[in-house]
Image: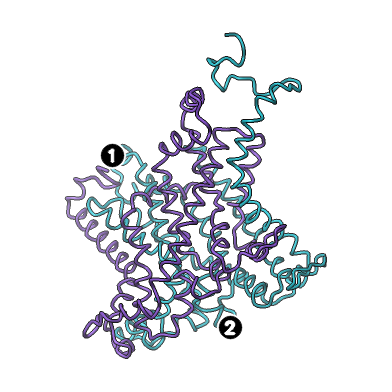
Amino acid sequence: MDRGFLSNIELRTTSGRLYYALAMVILLAVAVVALFPFFFAFTSGLKGSTEIFAAGLDLFPASPRWENYTNAWTMFDMSRLFGNSILITGVSVILRLTISAAAAFSLSKLKPFGGRIITLGFLLTLMIPSIAYFVPLYTTIARLPIINVSLLNTYWGLWLPYSVDAFSIFVLKTFFDRIPQDLLDSARVDGATALQMLRHIILPLSRSILIVLCVLAFVGLWKDFLLPYLVITDPSRQPITVRLFYIADDYSVNLQMAASFVALLPPLLIAILLQRYMKVGLTLGGVKG
Amino acid sequence: MNSPYSLDTPIEQLPTKPKHFDLSRLRLALPRQITAYLFLLPALIVFALFAWLPIVKSVEMSFQHVTLGGESTWVGLENFSLMLKDPAFAIAWRNAFEFTSWSLMLGFIVPIVIALLVAEIRAGKGFFRVVYFLPTVVPAAVAVIIWRFIYDPDAGVLNEILIALGLPRQFWLQDVGLAKPSLVAVMTWAGFGTTALIYLASLQDVSQDLYEAAELDGATPLRRIWHISLPHLYPVMSLMFVLQIIAVVQIFTEPFLLTSGGPGRETLTPAMNIYNRAFIRLDMGYASAWSVTMIVVLAVFSIIYQLVNRRLSADR
């Protein structure tokens, strides 16, 4: 952008410079507040177990104890916890996108009878917050109807509910609608099956939006607490968010902080490295409906 | 080439609605319909099991007494009349209202101001965008471990700052008056960046010519904000306003993990009470009456949201 409500010339005047400096100070102050908990967890994680309770405003440790981080890693069994979280979110993201892309493709290009009603049924779930039907969702996971199988303490109990996402279906359908029908018709004439059209025409054309939805799903599911908290009660299978909170109290505060900071790294790295996609995802989310 | 099924005819022009029942057309459409439904099937199954069925059951269970074994008996409106008599009902919904008010006070204006400021920055926009966004990706369960130490009455850094400034220490999460705003501060920290970025994206759409023209007409920068930037943001603002209410009414994880509803029942929210009733006291029918109340309350805001959103997309 070349200019905002201030022009570049105005910015070079005294009051313009003053405004610019003030804006920078405010923005930097907010940035400090936003980053403070990360910084605080990091430096507290380097302190000794009694040093952390010492009076006075000491943000930095007297001598950094890097071994806290290796200790926290082994004491909290973090490689296993990370593995669990990656398995839970990874499979969920793949399932969610596969199921949503197939459904969106069908609704957009194959025109099933009753497609409008089905779309409405999907959209309905966006309007009802999940906390409002959380109890029967849990009883369904605890005992699936008809086949009477319990998914408690299995990852299917998370993978399947997590694959329900009307937002992905809706975004993908809108995107697929813009892909010209001619492309598919010529493929059909050449004898392509519907699956081949999806794999070789639709999905390659939608790569960017698929990545955006992947990143959004990953970050959202990695954060989730209540469902894994109730569904996975076996300590060795719990994701990092749940397990860390459970056992944090058993350890000294400096180790808690070190473990928390390590636990934050994967989503932070994703947000920083894939910020381009997250930005698109945000504006998608802002005006969905 | 006059046949309606010739290869040259674009698919859209093929007859789609037969005037009378036509067996040959059905035979032609059936394989395509089967394919279409095969692609839809996985979604239909997971939605049926994990969304539609639970939604229906939530309403059904609110009129039932459900035992641990899963047997249910119809009890009519008993759950609802019990709910209205329950002192927790007024407390939880008053708390939800106060949480919402605090959240709007602390968190509604801030993202707008930040977006306006970032939009004027000529260098380093990308930096601020990422930094403000980072708290958004933090799992609440982990954030809570860090924040409860920040709020710690004895060793917490917040009280250390107060003491360094010569002020008395506060019991942030244990004080009746402070518990709510302290929780809302955590939520605001976690959420303001997303909202600010949405405002920022909207601000980028303002035509520079408008600012140019206003400047030529002698409008001061403040008046340019007031008459150009803010009116441009109004639709998004009303959207964010409703979305924020919808989000805060459902608030669960932060009070559940940080205060467990205390001090007293000061931070008990409707969602927490649903959890307590269903999973601690195992009274699923009664909990469902609360859930239905929540659906109704949020449905009102959802409808408002839809109306606002429709007007917004119509304007474009």
Q: Is residue B132 left or right of residue A141?
A: left
- Which of the two discs, 2 and 1, labels the residue nearer the N terminus? 1
From the image, state whether disc 2 or disc 1 is nearer to you: 2
The residue carrying mark 2 is B264
- Seen at 64% across and 46% down, the residue is A121
Residue A142: horizontal and vertical position, in percent? 65, 66
Q: Quadrant of residue A109?
A: top right
* Image position, residue B26 (x, y; %): 70, 26
- Do discs 2 and 1 belong to a common subunit? yes
Q: Which chain is purple?
A: A
Label 1 belongs to which residue?
Answer: B212
Mark 2–mark 1 Cα distance, whole angstroms, equals 57 Å
- Kindly indicate the quadrant of the structure image that contains residue A152: bottom right
A42, above or below A129, in the image: below
Task: Residue type at mark 2: give it.
Answer: Gly
Amino acid type shown at disc 1: Glu
Where disc 1 sits, the SS reads helix
Q: Residue furthest front?
A: A191
Q: Which chain is cyan?
A: B
B73 left or right of A42? Answer: right
Closest to the observer, B120 or B226: B120
Give the letter of the chain under mark 2: B
Residue A39 x, y percent position in the rendering: 30, 72
Q: Residues within 10 Å of mark 2 (few under 14, many from 20)?
A: few
Chain ID of residue with mark 1: B
